Image (cartoon, grey):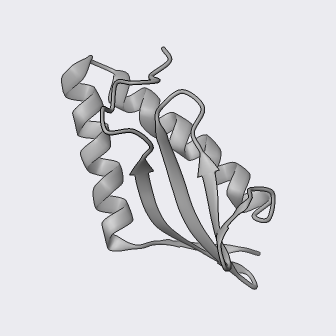
Amino acid sequence: MISIDFHNLAEQELLTSRDYYDNLVFGLGKKFVLEVEQIINMITSTPLTFPVYFKNYRKALLRKFPYFIIYKVDDNHILFLQFHIRKENRNIGLIE
């Protein structure tokens, strides 16, 4: 069974982004978190599916929000390191 952990900064980035979207449009933060959860579930079930970003770090793109997730796979453990924005403006590329 695969265990997962989140780097403290990754958790902080996720919560900050959720709050940003909730302040922008009520309920949008929840949609953001749901998409992140979907990607995390995909990563957990098939961790090597997403492309290598650097050495043994991988990168998964969100579909509806301009973010990507950086994670590291070691044996049966996944460490989520970053929830990072792809563009300077969080609204660019946002698909509702």
Q: Is residue 56 above or below residue 60?
A: below
Q: Is residue 43 above or below residue 91?
A: below
Residue at image point 62% right, 41% down = 38
Quarter of image, res 72:
bottom right
Asked if residue 89 lies left or right of residue 86, the reply is left
Position of residue 18 measured from the top left corner of the image (x, y, whole percent)? 31, 39
Asked if residue 53 lies left or right of residue 83, the reply is right
Position of residue 85 measured from the top left corner of the image (x, y, whole percent)? 40, 45
**Number of numbered discs present?**
0
Q: Residue furthest left?
A: 23
The quarter of the rendered structure image containing the N terminus is bottom right
Residue at image point 75% right, 85% down = 75
Q: Is residue 55 above or below residue 53?
A: below
Asked if residue 19 lies left or right of residue 76, the reply is left
Q: Nearer the viewer, residue 61 or 32?
A: 61
Asked if residue 76 lies left or right of residue 79, the reply is right
Q: Residue furthest bottom?
A: 75
Position of residue 77 measured from the top left corner of the image (x, y, whole percent)? 66, 79
Quarter of image, res 7:
bottom left
Residue at image point 35% right, 61% down = 11
Position of residue 56 measured from the top left corner of the image (x, y, whole percent)? 68, 78
